Image: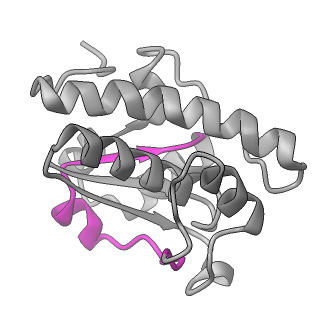
């Protein structure tokens, strides 16, 4: 399984989700590829936001090796599932998609927890550490369900039926 998380700049939400899921998969001994990307080039090559690093580090998850990168159309070919954080990201993905098959690989990350509700993961960028903690909790809950579903090979978690 190859999973991609996307957000705006690829320095807050998506690298946190990437780090959380990698940690969970490693603990469960599940082989999978996990990556993250963004849509705004102003953070390409940047380290994660310091607040994201501090939030994950408190849980012994190290995301300091991550560097922001841009989403490309080739990501639709490379990844089995692409999780986005909010409606802006869905719009961006739809602009990159070549057809319905590309978009079938995408979903709101929080639909894993609340199927079909299309709830966003809030952008913590403009807020303080409390916002990053809240985002961590959202991401952790979704990644826990995702990791367990990969262990049981349940590919339909959170998908609209």
Point out the stretch of residues depicted in magenta.
66-86
Is 72 magenta? The answer is yes
Residue in the foreground of this view, choosing between 110 and 93: 110
Residue 80 x %, y %: 18, 49
Q: Quadrant of the C terminus?
A: top left
Q: Is residue 26 shown above or below 131?
A: below
Q: Residue at x 62, y 61 (%)?
A: 8
Q: Residue at x 67, y 38 (%)?
A: 135
Residue 23 x %, y %: 37, 49
88 displayed left or right of 133: left
Residue 157 x %, y %: 27, 21
81 displayed left or right of 125: left
Is 125 magenta? The answer is no
Q: Residue at x 54, y 52 (%)?
A: 60
Please identify the quarter of the rendering in which residue 156 is found: top left
Q: Residue at x 56, y 73 (%)?
A: 64
Please identify the quarter of the rendering in which residue 74 is found: bottom left
151 displayed left or right of 108: left
Residue 51 x %, y %: 77, 59
């Amino acid at each position: 399984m190859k999973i991609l998380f996307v957000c705006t700049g690829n320095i807050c939400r998506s690298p946190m989700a990437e780090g959380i899921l990698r940690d969970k998969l490693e603990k469960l001994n599940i082989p999978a590829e996990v990556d993250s990307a963004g849509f705004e080039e102003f953070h390409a090559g940047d380290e994660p936001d310091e607040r994201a690093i501090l939030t994950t580090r408190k849980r012994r998850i190290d995301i300091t090796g991550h560097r922001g990168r841009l989403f490309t159309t080739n990501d639709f070919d490379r990844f089995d599932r692409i999780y986005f954080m909010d409606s802006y990201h869905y719009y961006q993905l739809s602009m990159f998609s070549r057809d319905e098959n590309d978009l079938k690989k995408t979903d709101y990350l929080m639909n894993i927890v609340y199927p079909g509700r299309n709830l966003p993961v809030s952008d913590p960028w403009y807020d303080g550490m409390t916002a990053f903690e809240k985002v961590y909790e959202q991401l952790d809950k979704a990644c826990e369900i995702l990791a367990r579903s990969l262990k049981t090979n349940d590919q339909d978690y959170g998908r609209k039926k």
